Image: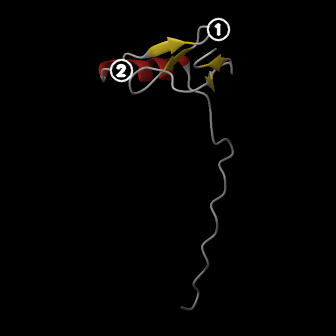
Amino acid sequence: MAGAQAAQPAQPAAQPFRPATPEERAAVYQALRDAGERHFQHCVNGHMFVVGNCGTLAGAGRCPDCQAHIGPGC
């Protein structure tokens, strides 16, 4: 194969993640509500998060907004 070039690894995006805007979060929460999801909870600082499946927190984690502990025993 004359002139064939080896594949180059993809370059990482300059900013691979950006936080969702309040409007985007509201749209996601509304879509979850429309789909029948009812397991919304709040961290100690009032940030909303969703617990899937049966709605019972199976393990500890951190709030994606403020890093407060969430889950059993918190």
**Mark 2, residue position:** 37
Q: Quadrant of residue 63?
A: top right
Instruction: Pinpoint residue 68: horizontal percent, then vertical percent.
Output: 68, 17
Q: Helix, strand, or loop for circle 2?
A: loop
Q: Report whether 67 appears left or right of 35.
A: right
Are the residues at dot 2 and dot 1 in contact (C-beta closer than 8 Å)?
A: no
**Mark 1, residue position:** 45
Q: Residues within 10 Å of mark 2 (few under 14, many from 20)?
A: some
Q: Quadrant of residue 37?
A: top left
Quarter in which the C terminus is drawn:
top right
Q: How many marks on residues? A: 2
Give, as a three-letter code, the residue at label 1: Asn
Q: CA distance from mark 2 to mark 1?
A: 22 Å
The residue shown at (64%, 65%) is 9
Establish if 1 lies above or below 8.
below
Establish if 2 lies above or below 17.
below
Residue sitting at the far bottom? 2
Residue sitting at the far front? 73
Instruction: Pinpoint residue 18: horizontal percent, then vertical percent.
Output: 62, 33
The residue shown at (43%, 23%) is 28
Instruction: Pinpoint residue 67: horizontal percent, then vertical percent.
Output: 69, 21
Q: Report whether 65 appears left or right of 30.
A: right
Give, as a three-letter code, the residue at label 2: Glu
Establish if 9 lies above or below 53.
below
Q: Quadrant of residue 47?
A: top right
Q: Nearer the viewer, residue 8 or 72?
A: 72
Q: Report whether 21 appears left or right of 53.
A: right
The residue shown at (30%, 24%) is 35
Q: Residues within 10 Å of mark 1 (few under 14, many from 20)?
A: few
